[in-house]
Amino acid sequence: MKSLRIPLLLAVLAHAVPAGAAHLPVSLLEHVDDRVLALSIPEEALVDSPRWQPGQGPVPFTVQQLIRRIENWVQQTRPEVESVRFREFVLKPVESPRYGRYWHYLVVFRPVVGGRESEQDSYVAVLLDGRIFHGLVEPGL
């Protein structure tokens, strides 16, 4: 199983956001083996998701809810996929220069089509309100 070997590297498109400036997406870059996983989450989506911090009670979006949400999302977006095989769930922080720290799940799964599990991992970020953002994996630098 390919694993996420380097902790989350948060790349924010703007360091200081002037008041009244347009909201820019928060970009997340994660090193996966010799490749880079890139995710983009609009700041507005972060702000609309539940605010949670470790030690402040249970996570507002459970792993059971996460599994059901991803299975439904895959069914809607890729009807040829029969099921998914989950490989990894990681609860990670994401920082917004304007709004502070929020949390999301980084999920790795493989689609099953024609009874065969894909050899390629799929990556998504899931906010704590269930919204899913698909990641793209590109060759590393």
Image (cartoon, rainbow, N blue to C red):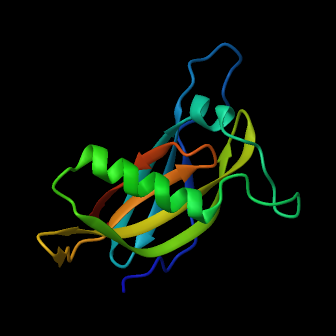
Residue 36 against residue 116 in the figure, above or below: above
Q: Is residue 37 above or below residue 6?
A: above
Left or right: 136 in relation to 115:
right
Left or right of 131 on screen, residue 71: left
Residue found 41% across the figure and 69% down from its top = 108
Q: Residue at position x 88%, y 57% from top?
A: 56
Q: Where residue 65 sits: x, y (%)? A: 57, 56
The residue sitting at 37% across, 82% down in the picture is: 2
Q: Residue furthest right?
A: 56
Q: Foreground: 31 or 120?
A: 120
Residue 1 versus residue 18 in the image, above or below: below
**The C terminus appears in which quarter of the rendering?**
bottom left
Q: What is the number of callouts on the image?
A: 0
At x 21%, y 60%, the residue is 81
Q: Nearer the viewer, residue 130 or 22?
A: 130
Name the side, left or right, on which 37 lies relative to 79.
right
Expressed as whole percent of the image width and height from the top left, the position of residue 23 reads 57, 24
In this view, the residue farthest toward the top is 20
Q: Nearer the viewer, residue 63 or 99?
A: 63
- Place of residue 42 in the rendered image (x, y in percent of width and height, measured from the top left): 52, 34
